[in-house]
Amino acid sequence: MLTVNPQRRINATEALKHPWICQRERVASVVHRQQTVDCLKKFNARRKLKGAILTTMLATRNFSSRSIVAKKGDGSHVKESTESNTTVEDDDCKEDRKVDRSATVIAREPEENGPGKCQVSLVPVIQRNDQVFNDGCARGSSSLDSEEEARKQEIVKLTEQLVEAITVGDYEAYTKLCDPHLTSFEPEALSNLVEGMEFHKFYFDNVLGKFRKAINTTILNPNVHLLGDEAACIAYVRLSQYIDRQGVPHTEQAEETRVWHRHDGRWQHIHFHRSQNGSK
Ligand code: GLY
């Protein structure tokens, strides 16, 4: 009955026929006692270890989501909230049971004059089985899985920082995360491949963080592929809610794929592709 895999675990009818149950006077109290105690100890130890690993992973994520406070010259203010509605099920495994983790919301609150405050918080989203985070049950919790998930987390965090820089129009923060020869396809470039930073700088200088009273950016279902140790690719949907200067609310959706490369120990954004509202 303690078998983790539900396919191999005995069902209720079989359990009732098991000598352990139906002859409990003769069997349960006499036979297997030490073996059972040992198995229960092992089972509990595994649960505890799994819980500790998940707690550590979540603590790392939550801690880092508290830390950014950036002042910009134009008075805008970036901060991250500590809110995280993460749910962890510390129970035995089922393949389709997933830890319900976050989408990132980057929100800029309105101010009378100037672009206003920006707030980053984590909100839960329902994720499919194949997405970034899983509790390791399907393949068995191993340090390899945890390591891989931690590396994926790092890519998600970098992407959050990049999107935050775009949301608030912080070109300096953006360039720090990008390779100077960044290539991109995006709707603004009309299907042309753009190389370098100048094209993007135009929007930072003239548009981003300027004409919208409040912005709320949500990164939905980030999905990371690790490409060896030095590269990774992330895909997600970005939702931007904003209030225009006339007080009218709008929502924009973009689908983004971003490629990261680690060079001399530092992750750099080297390519992205964005389509918007189903367009190319
Ligand atoms: N247009 C800048 C970016 O999406 O990275």
Image: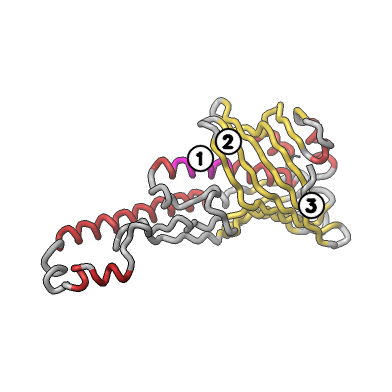
Residue occupied by mark 1: 151
Residue occupied by mark 3: 115
Mark 2 vs mark 3, CA separation in Å: 33 Å
Specify start and end residues of the magenta stretch as a single range.
147-155
Left or right relative to 46: residue 123: right
Secondary structure predominantly adopted by residues drawn in magenta: helix
Q: Label 2, secondary structure: give it.
A: strand
Quadrant housing residue 250? bottom right
Tell me if the residue at label 1 has its CB under 8 Å from ligand 1: no
Please state, as top left, top right, bottom left or bottom right, where the C terminus lies in the image: top right
Residue 53 image point, x, y percent: 40, 50
Task: Name the amino acid, label 2.
Answer: Ala
Q: Label 3, secondary structure: give it.
A: loop
* Mark earlier in primary sequence (2, 3): 3
Quadrant of picture, ligand 1 = top right
Other residues around mark 3 within 10 Å, as few (<14) / some (14–19) / many (≥20): many
Q: What residue lies at 33% left-to-right and 57% top-to-bottom?
A: 8
| Between 45 and 210, the one nearer to me in the picture | 45
Asked if the residue at tag 3 contacts the one at tag 2, i.e. Cβ–Cβ closer than 8 Å, the answer is no
Q: What residue lies at 26% left-to-right and 55% top-to-bottom?
A: 42
Mark 2 vs mark 1, CA separation in Å: 9 Å
Please state, as top left, top right, bottom left or bottom right, where the N terminus lies in the image: bottom left
| Between 185 and 17, the one nearer to me in the picture | 17
Count of numbered marks: 3
Residue 203 image point, x, y percent: 82, 40
Task: Name the amino acid, label 3.
Answer: Pro
Asked if the residue at tag 1 contacts the one at tag 2, i.e. Cβ–Cβ closer than 8 Å, the answer is yes
Residue occupied by mark 2: 232
Residue 180 image point, x, y percent: 70, 27
